Amino acid sequence: MLRSLYSGISGLRAHQTMLDVTGNNIANVNTAGFKASTTQFQDTLSQMTQGASAPQGQTGGSNPAQIGLGVRVAGVSTNFAQGSSQSTGRATDMMISGDGFFVTSKGGQQLFTRAGSMTFDAASQLVSPDGGILQGWTANQSGGVDQSGAIGDITLNPNTMIANATSKVTLDGNLPSDALVTSPPFDRVVKVYDATGAERKVTLTFAKAAGGWSANGVDDNGATAGITLGQQADGTLTPSGPFVIGTSPNAITVDLSKVSGYASMSSLTVASQNGSAAGKLESFTLGNDGSLIGSFSNGTKQVLAKIALAKFTNPAGLEKAGGSSYVATANSGNVQLGAAGAPGIGTLAGGSLEMSNVDLSQEFTNLIVAQRGFQANARIITTSDEVLQELGNLKR
């Protein structure tokens, strides 16, 4: 039987695979985070009809004569080039600018994806459309994130409450240097909070003394403290030491560095205090480093969690697992976890999605090439059949 028949058959199979890959690319032209694939061909084994010979004496050498036995698909490679950005305005939509992957967990299996279309489920977990739970690090009570720890499910409970204990009170303004020792003292009352959000008052009293001022503080818990403020010739006041009311964990440092001591003006005010009452989570935003920053009803903003991203030595070695997800293989290399902004991972943008990187003009060209290749290999088979028919007609 003619070898060209089998070469033609192998060509039909290879170009059919190319058509399948191209068709899948075109079908996913609007799939968020989809990466196009490319078919790679290579020839099969060749039949040796004449071996090579070396030059001998006055006879030249000869080259080998081989007849190819067809083509086969060498591989289907994935193009991980960056897709274009599409703004959606949804806070739970995320886009990676770089080479990283989101990490999700589904049925106990760790998956990786570029599709950042996330939503909240009934358990307040951030999940992908196919139910994979987004992975990352949960922040502690003070908003700190330990990236050296194990990653886990990211949950943003809408009933999350937070309160900030007051640790610092800042005063601003001026204490008049020309006030009399017999002048009435200046009292300033400031509301402060403990770690549970409970409110109490701290009363600060400033009385004129020889050479400056005396400052005393007392809070509703009975804690007291006092220092002196030395009057300087240039109008500045020098505290005799730190002004700390109470003891840990309810200690409050009074910052007097902005208070001056010029003549004829009294403008002492409480500029700020860093505590707050209890507040409920109202919304969240995504930082470029993958931090999910919660906004609370008491005006506090605090990191709640940080999204983990993964990178691989050879992303093309990942295996597609459906649902726009991948799993690691022996040739992808070990997963390397990190936060957005780390070298080789990229940054995150909220309210946007990465679109498919399918190039329709290239795919339609590949479609034509695959179709013509299929037709040419079909012609090989029909031509070989005509040759066999002629052979059969030699005997009538």
Image (cartoon, helix red, strand yellow):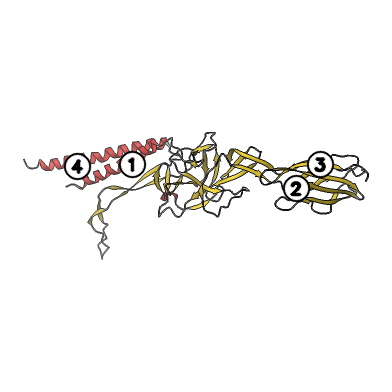
Q: Quick one: label 2 or label 1, which is nearer the N terminus?
A: 1
**Three-letter code, disc 3:** Arg
Q: Quick one: label 4 or label 2, which is nearer the N terminus?
A: 2
**Three-letter code, disc 1:** Met
Q: Quick one: label 2 or label 3, which is nearer the N terminus?
A: 3
Q: CA distance from mark 2 to mark 1?
A: 78 Å
Q: 10 Å neighbourhood of mark 1: few (<14), some, or many (≥20)?
A: many
Q: Nearer the viewer, mark 4 or mark 1?
A: 1
Q: Which mark is residue 188?
A: 3
The residue wearing badge 2 is 221
Q: CA distance from mark 4 to mark 2?
A: 102 Å
Q: Are marks 4 and 2 in contact (CB under 8 Å)?
A: no
Q: Quick one: label 3 or label 1, which is nearer the N terminus?
A: 1
* Side of 236 relative to 17 (left or right): right
- Res 366 quadrant in image: top left
Query: x%, y% of residue 137?
Result: 54, 49
The residue wearing badge 4 is 384
Secondary element at image label 1: helix
Secondary element at image label 2: loop
Q: Nearer the viewer, mark 3 or mark 1?
A: 3
Q: CA distance from mark 4 to mark 1?
A: 24 Å
The residue wearing badge 1 is 18
**Closer to the camera in the image, 377 or 90:** 90
